Image: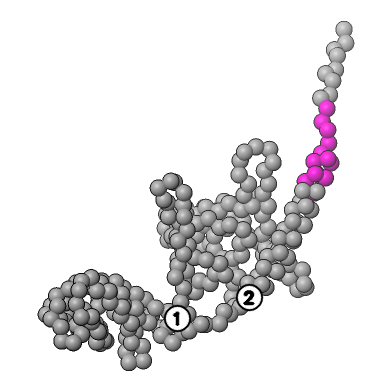
């Protein structure tokens, strides 16, 4: 099945290369378009569906999927998914496994580095400073301050690491920065580094939020059901292809009539 859609300006209508519409009123599945690809004859790839968008005007969508129902999925993929461009998610991202960065090391291998997880939503920043006569003020980055909420109910957290010898320090926190003061009235001039964390704006009071929708166990059961259905459909299609191949008439070359003398 191949679909081609061409549109040239100034037309303002939708042009469909392949359109599918399915209605279901029973417990059976309803499929608008079903694609199945298999390649058992050479080293080429198999594609159940192949979609390319190359318009010169407006946005191009290789695939556009939509569902109005909260309990459904606009897209469902069972197996590995390879994304070679930027992946933008306009809502939440929930995973039941790990979130990793693949980093190449000296021996050519790629090793996985995992994200830190937290029961609350924090943003963090790092920096360095130096005491001057036993004290100094650190003002946080203005752009960072636009992404977090810092107030009496949601104070920032500050962690200071001294990088020199002094009597120790304590921190006095404000709304946009903090003071670092040497203990016991000290007058040292030692450098330090710091880490500051603050609540993400708009998510200040979220803690151990409950996962909505299907549980991982329910999704695994659904995956198994869909996989079994895919295998049944694949078997049916292969049997149908084999039956059609066997039903093709064998065309034999008719003998050329001999001319009479």
Q: CA distance from mark 1 to mark 2?
A: 21 Å
Residue drawn at the location 58% of the way across and 51% of the way down = 50
- Quadrant assignment, res 177: bottom left
Q: Is residue 144 visible?
A: no
Q: Quadrant of the C terminus?
A: top right
Instruction: Judge whether 195 appears above or below 223 on screen.
Output: below
Residue placed most toward the observer, 80 or 66: 80
**Front label number (1 vs 2):** 1
Closer-to-camera residue (105/92): 105
Name the main secondary structure of what is drawn in magenta: helix
Residue 251 colored in magenta in the image: yes
Residue 142 position, x and y percent, is: 25, 77
Q: Position of residue 257 (x, y in %)?
A: 85, 17
Question: Picture coordinates of residue 96 (x, y %)?
Answer: 57, 70
Q: Is residue 229 magenta?
A: no
- Above/below status of 161 relative to 113: below
The image's colouring method is: one colour
In the image, is 58 to the left or to the right of 80?
Answer: left
Tell me if mark 2 has few (under 14), some (14-19) or many (20+) residues whose alpha carbon lies within 10 angstroms of its own.
few
Contact? badges 1 and 2 (CB < 8 Å): no
Residue lying farthest to the right in this orientation: 260
Q: Which residue is mark 2?
A: 215
11 in relation to 240, above or below: below
- The residue located at (57%, 79%) in the rendering is 211
Residue 136 visible in this rendered orientation of the protein: yes
Name the secondary structure under disc 2. loop
Q: Is residue 127 left or right of residue 130?
A: right
Q: Which residues are magenta?
A: 240-252
The structure residue drawn at horizontal position 37% and vertical position 76%, both measured from the top left corner, is 123
Q: Which mark is residue 120?
A: 1
């Amino acid at each position: 099945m191949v679909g081609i859609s061409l549109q040239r300006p100034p037309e303002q209508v939708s042009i469909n290369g392949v359109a599918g519409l399915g209605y279901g009123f029973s417990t059976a599945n309803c499929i608008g378009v079903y694609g199945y690809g298999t390649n058992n004859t050479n080293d080429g790839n198999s594609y159940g569906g192949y979609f390319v968008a190359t318009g010169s005007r407006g946005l191009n969508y290789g695939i556009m999927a939509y569902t109005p129902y909260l309990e459904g999925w606009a897209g469902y993929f069972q197996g590995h998914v390879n994304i070679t461009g930027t992946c933008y998610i306009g809502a939440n991202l929930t995973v039941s496994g790990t979130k990793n960065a693949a980093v190449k090391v000296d021996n050519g291998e790629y090793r996985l580095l995992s994200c830190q997880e937290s029961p609350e939503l924090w943003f963090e920043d790092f920096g360095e400073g130096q005491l001057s006569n036993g004290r100094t003020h650190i003002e946080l980055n203005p752009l960072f301050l636009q992404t977090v909420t810092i107030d009496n109910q949601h104070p920032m957290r500050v962690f200071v690491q001294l990088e020199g010898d002094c009597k120790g320090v304590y921190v006095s926190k404000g709304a946009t920065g903090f003071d670092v003061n040497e203990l016991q009235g000290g007058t040292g001039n030692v450098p330090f580094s710091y880490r500051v964390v603050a609540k993400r704006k708009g998510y200040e009071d979220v803690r151990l939020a409950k996962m909505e929708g299907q549980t991982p166990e329910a999704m695994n059961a659904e995956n198994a059901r869909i996989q079994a259905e895919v295998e049944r459909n694949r078997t049916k299609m292969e049997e149908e292809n084999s039956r059609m191949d066997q039903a093709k008439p064998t065309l034999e070359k008719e003998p050329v009539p001999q001319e009479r003398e």
